[in-house]
Amino acid sequence: MGLRRRLSLPENLTHSHPALKTSSVPLSDFTQDCVAQLCVIYCCAMKNPFEFGRELGVGELVDRDAEVAEVIETVRQGGKLFIIGPRRYGKTSILKAAEDRLRTAGAVLLRYDAESYPSLDLLVSALIAGAAQHLKGGVGRAGEQIRRFFARLRPELNFHVTEREWTVKVGVNSSDTREGHVELLVDALNGLEELAKAQPKTRPVGLVIDEFQRIVAMGGQAVEAHIRAAIQRHNRTGYVFAGSKTRLLTAMTMDAARPFYRLGGLRFIGPLPRADFSNFLQNKFVESRFTPPDTGAITLILNLAEDVPYNVQMLAHACWEKLRAAASKEGRTLNETVVRQSLERLVRQYDPFYTQLWSALTAIQQKILSAVITEDGINLQSMKVVRMLGKGPSTVRRSLGALMDRGILRQEERSRQIRMRFEDPFFAQWIRMFTPRL
């Protein structure tokens, strides 16, 4: 008499093999092996649900609906919005999701990362080319409109038929100087407003510039006043300026002496609500047909990644891959051991990069990073820490500033307490694992 065993197969398999839906069937050893092989094939074919290292689109973000909605509404209303948030917190993905929704609705939405352009004139050329790409009525008419809207810039346009895209060169004599670059940008913004006015009222026009602090670095602080003078008169173009240099952007927008003070709305991007992120992680592991994870394991992922969305996804991705490679059902359960092993593997993969970064630091900077870890980033200029480091308060202060300028540390204020945090929490984990106590 055949042994009867109850099957619990992935739903995807039962869709393609209806006979496998039977809850209790006689199974020979050969049949059991076949079913096992089907399950293994299914696990191997699954896609890792934890994405990192790319812009996430609509439907892929966790609990960022309010932020995306605010960007969309700003563009639709022709307003101004500043988005400030550390790197790895999903700021760029928020902008991408808003762009996708606006473009689907027919809006003219231009989005650029300022750090991708070595100078303002190159950014201006990209902006005009992007505007031409959105105009309707054929190549000839689009070129004619661009030359009219951006007449002060005397743009030279070329349309590449094979690539179906425009290239633009602006011709202004003063463009070789910083002041000339600023003039180019202001003229481009005014031209964009003229383009917006020519669109139907139901067609929003928006400009999104990520890493906006780079604009100031390229054009000098005077660029703030010039941009404000231009866009405060614009009411058809919506502007969204985002940046990850939180100290710089906060000073730029909240200092009453700076031109951007109260120019538009402010949105600070912080960590995701832990409960929502925990549920997201839990659900994705369960949907992948792994044994429901331990609650402690999910909490450990969030703790080790310090709630930074990019790093949480990266560590969860590594855990998922380790579970998929497990040979037994028992090995496909997410627990704290799996999390710690996955973290160590991740950190070892980045060892060459972290080693190079660490070696380029001065001895006092290395000591300060170790102190950030031991003191949890709090009271780093206290006499206790200063004595431990063996340097004066001014030296410690300068070193902290240098580490922030290099993007290794960032300053966070919560509950009226200043705390220094690593931009990359896995670099902190590497220091814990592979460097001697200083």
Image (tube, grey):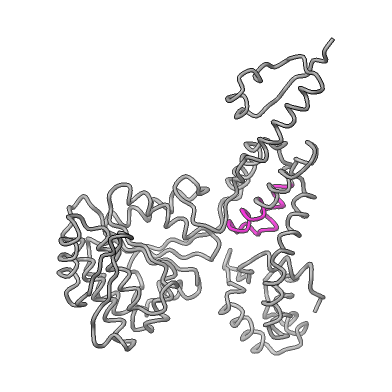
Image position, residue 30 (x, y; %):
79, 23
In the image, 156 versus 182, the foreground residue is: 156
Q: Please report the residue visible at 70 percent of the width from the left and 72 percent of the height from the top.
A: 352
The overriding secondary structure of the stretch rendered in magenta is helix
Rendered view: 347 above or below 214: above
User: Does the stretch in magenta take in 397?
Assistant: no
Q: Nearer the viewer, residue 435 or 47?
A: 47
Image vertical order of residue 206 relative to residue 222, above or below: above
- Residue 40: quadrant of the picture: top right
Q: Quadrant of residue 365?
A: bottom right
Say if residue 79 shows up in the picture.
Answer: no
Specify the farthest residue to the top. 1
* Residue range highlighted in magenta: 297-316
- Residue at 29%, 74% (x, y): give it: 228
Q: Does 115 appear above or below 321? A: below
277 to the left or right of 262: right
Specify the quadrant that holds the C terminus: bottom right
Check the image and name the residue furthest to the right. Answer: 1
Q: Is residue 172 visible?
A: yes
Residue at position x 19%, y 65% from top?
A: 143
